[in-house]
Image: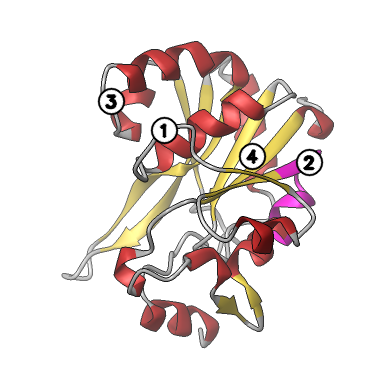
Amino acid sequence: MIDTNNITGLILAGGRGSRMGGVDKGLQNFNGIPLALNTLMRLQMQVGQVMVNANRNLAAYESFGAQVWPDVLDDYAGPLAGFLTGLERCETTFLATAPCDSPLFPTDLVARLAHALEEQDADLAMACAPETDEHGHTELRTQPVFCLLRVDLLDSLVAFTQAGGRKIDAWTAQHKVALVNFDQPGDDPRAFANANTLQELQALENR
């Protein structure tokens, strides 16, 4: 099995927060603590160390006790910019990513991703979870910001982003991906629900 101490966790908190009115999403409270701190507390028990990708209010994020790194790409280039930043700064063999706005993600996330990555000898492992559309139809969908990556993917991601690529799915499609379904007995169907608006955040608090 992959040694937990050989995995660095990366919290993705570098977005604009456009659908929350431009606020810094990672610093919005969930059950009394900032979303990003909630993510850190949930992730740090699963990995050897944690760092944060943020582009604003860096001192506030640093107060959580983790290293904080802004995007290495300009103009809020999205989650792949966070991946790139994390891979460049990571000093372990593996990098586990989680966004700051899904506060209920599984506490066994990294272990299950690591098991699948190793079992399938994949380049990266990605979570899949049930999602229900507006018609009430539920199906498994990939959760591309919940990944376990081999750090030696850095060169590939540098080349992809330098060529103008910004979509996670387009980049991961170039590699062998182990998909991990989080729809097993005991799995919380809301585990990967994310809060794009303050109303959605309140709904997650009140679930």
> Is residue 47 at all visible to an observer of this figure?
no
Range shown magenta: 41-50
Name the quadrant containing residue 157.
Answer: top left
Decide which of tag 4 and tag 2 comes sooner along the chain.
2
Decide which of tag 3 and tag 2 comes sooner along the chain.
2
Q: CA distance from mark 3 to mark 1?
A: 12 Å
Q: Residue at x 36, y 73 (%)?
A: 20
Q: Residue at x 62, y 72 (%)?
A: 34
Question: Local crowd at mark 3 within 10 Å, few (<14), some, or many (≥20)?
Answer: some
84, 6: nearer the viewer: 84
Q: Residue at x 71, y 35 (%)?
A: 8
Question: Local crowd at mark 4 within 10 Å, few (<14), some, or many (≥20)?
Answer: some
Residue 204, percent from left and from top? 49, 78
Q: Secondary structure at mark 1?
A: loop
Q: Amino acid at mark 2?
A: Gln
Decide which of tag 1 and tag 2 comes sooner along the chain.
2
Q: CA distance from mark 1 to mark 2?
A: 23 Å
- What residue did someone put label 1 on? 73
Q: Is residue 142 magenta?
A: no
Q: CA distance from mark 4 to mark 3?
A: 29 Å
Decide which of tag 4 and tag 3 comes sooner along the chain.
4
Up-down relation of residue 180 to residue 117 (above or below) = below
Tell me whether circle 4 and circle 1 mark residues in contact (CB < 8 Å): no
Q: CA distance from mark 4 to mark 2?
A: 18 Å
Q: Residue at x 41, y 54 (%)?
A: 15
